[in-house]
Amino acid sequence: MGWLQPTNLDVEDSMSHSRPLNTMVENGPTVLWNDSANPEELKESISYGAVGATCNPVIALACIKADLPRWSARIRELAQEMPTAGESEIGWKVVEEVSIDAAELLMPAFEKYKGVNGRLSMQTDPRLHRDADALVQQAVHFDSLMPNTIVKIPATSTGIVAIEEATYRGVCINVTVSFTVPQAVAAGEAIERGLKRREAEGLPVDEMGPVVTIMCGRLDDWLKKVYEKEKLCFDPGYLEWAGVAAFKEAYRIFGERGLRARLLSAAYRNALQWTEFVGGEVVISPPFAWQQRFQGSGIDPEPRIDVPVDAQVLETLKTMPEFRKAYAVDGMTPEEFDDFGATRTTLRQFLQADADLDALVRDILVPAP
């Protein structure tokens, strides 16, 4: 069902010499971004052909912990430079600096691709997820930090409003906290409205390069929880295809409706989330560890974006109401996005990362006696 085998080279030789990610990038429209802002990982990912990267509260916290002596010293400096700032303000200033470091590594790609690639994704503060105006204001601020930032706004009911307005103001958007076809299409249409408003006023759009993420693995995660909770009984391997099916369906609808934003696949849980999307004008954004696995796999990345998911798999998945919500373009209204299980789970994780960053800054500035 779509698993791509190594070429007919000897497998060991193939794994030693084949560079599947480079081949994918060089031979087609599918591009690679790195789901990390760690500078060492990003440098290697760029050698695989990566032309973008991302940061979010979880990733930023990991980057800070990975180079804690440097960032501890910087946090102390910021506390002196910003004597009235609280731990959250200082923590987010560090997030900005982590992001700027990564963005600088991507400037050559940004210039090569005229703004469509070569961008570093910065995520808006998840604590603002109920305030569209605040999300737009922070998006505009992040857009001002480097010429090659792209700003993440969640595909919630509030986020959809902010996505259109921020796009209209010239911010390149990467939609996040997005797992389903209805979320992706609503976000793609919000971006389209923002682009058209700019065009109506003679404002440029050609170098903005917006993307709409589908966190495929997080949809799979949620459906696996539902599968266990509801004591369902079908081949659990079918659940590995749920995010893939949603992504392919969204890709079909984006093409049908002429939406200009590209889809981006994130939250990897299996190699299908790479092999099944090759050939599409899309972004794949695996964590660095998954890129290493793909690069050493010996798989020949043939175009499969237009190959449908096996009918038996799809029909079985459709027996789950939660999958039908995720797969049908009208499966949820924007007001229902907020209560979808994967949305709540992911927002809570991002909010927890914010709290953990606050605690890290607190421990540096006010260490326990």
Image (cartoon, rainbow, N blue to C red):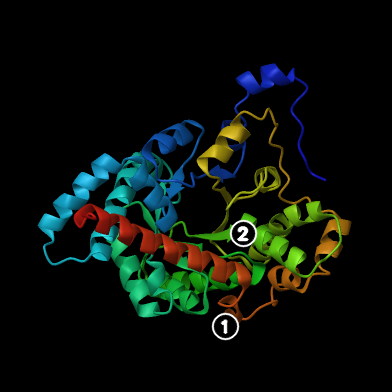
Q: Which quadrant of the view contains residue 299?
A: top right
Q: Which residue is mark 1?
A: 335
Nearest the viewer among 187 and 64 is 64
Amino acid type of disc 2?
Answer: Arg
Q: Decide if residue 153 is on the left or right side of residue 81.
A: right
Q: Position of residue 300 (x, y in %)?
A: 70, 31
Q: Mark number for residue 218?
A: 2
- SS of the residue under disc 2: helix
Q: Which class describes the residues within 10 Å of circle 1: few (<14), some (14-19), or many (20+)?
A: few
At a point 62% along the width and 19% down the height, the residue shown is 16
Question: Which mark is drawn over residue 159?
Answer: none
Which residue lies at the image location 68% right of the left edge and 16% below the top edge?
Answer: 13
Residue 195 as seen in the image, left or right of residue 334: left
Left or right: 294 as drawn, with respect to 231: left
Residue at 77% from the left image edge and 74% from the top image edge: 321
Q: Residue at x 20, y 55 (%)?
A: 365
Q: Quadrant of the C terminus?
A: bottom left
Picture quadrant of residue 29: top right
Q: Position of residue 33 (x, y in %)?
A: 50, 45
* Viewport quadrant of the N terminus: top right
Q: Is residue 354 left or right of residue 141?
A: right
Gap between marks 2 and 1 measured at Cα: 20 Å
How many numbered callouts? 2
Q: Which label lies toward us, 2 or 1?
A: 2
